[in-house]
Amino acid sequence: MLSIDWDVILARHGQMVIQAAMRILGCQSDAEDVAQEVFMEAFSSAKVPSRLPIRNWGAYLRKLAVFRAIDRRRQRSKNSTTSVDNLALPGFSAHDEAVRQELKENLRALVAALPEREGVVFALRYFEQLSNPEIAESLGISVGAVAAAIHKARSKLESTLTTHTEGDK
């Protein structure tokens, strides 16, 4: 079993893990908590002798961060009253930071409500700016599966937003 230098891994990938979680959660302290969970999970899983060695620590840790951030976001959504009714509509004033923040917060909540694979793929694509091949490699799925998950996620989000805006008419 190879020795893993956790100080190097933490120094090299710690900030990326926090940023990935932050983009989904929108809260620095929650993102830092998720980062701790991610590194504890990585440490525990690396100690399992039968586990294959991790070849790309950056991709592995980013994937864990997105999964854990979405889990935390879902948990937070269950405990709060954030709803689609609070979603700002297209055409809002771009200079109104409060409205933009509310829109971001509600989009994060909607993404967290998607099925796990679709939510993770959407988050990696649009929050983390990864390409479809990068997402496929990170998750161990085909590029076609990534494209299908993105399409499903966008369709579901569009449907949710359309239903909401039609209800206001």
Image (spheres, rainbow, N blue to C red):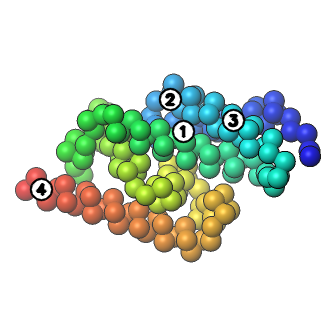
Q: Position of residue 133 (x, y in %)?
A: 64, 66
Please give the residue where the numbered disc 1 appears in the rendered image: 21
Q: Position of residue 140 (x, y in %)?
A: 66, 63
Q: Is any atom of residue 99 visible in this view?
A: no
The answer for how far apart the CA atoms under marks 2 and 4 are is 33 Å
The answer for how far apart the CA atoms under marks 2 and 3 are is 14 Å
Circle 3: element type: helix
The quadrant of the rendering that contains the C terminus is bottom left
Identify the residue at image location x=60%, y=71%: 143
Please give the residue where the numbered disc 2 appears in the rendered image: 30
Mark 2 or 4, nearer chain start: 2
**98 left or right of 6?**
left
Mark 2 or 3, nearer chain start: 2
Mark 2 surroundings within 10 Å by alpha-carbon count, few (fewer than 14), some (14 through 19), many (20 or more): some
Identify residue type, mark 2: Asp
Please give the residue where the numbered disc 4 appears in the rendered image: 167
Mark 1 or 3, nearer chain start: 1
Circle 2: element type: helix
Mark 4 or 1, nearer chain start: 1
The answer for how far apart the CA atoms under marks 4 and 3 are is 44 Å
Circle 1: element type: helix
Please give the residue where the numbered disc 3 appears in the rendered image: 39
The answer to which quarter of the image holds residue 153 is bottom left
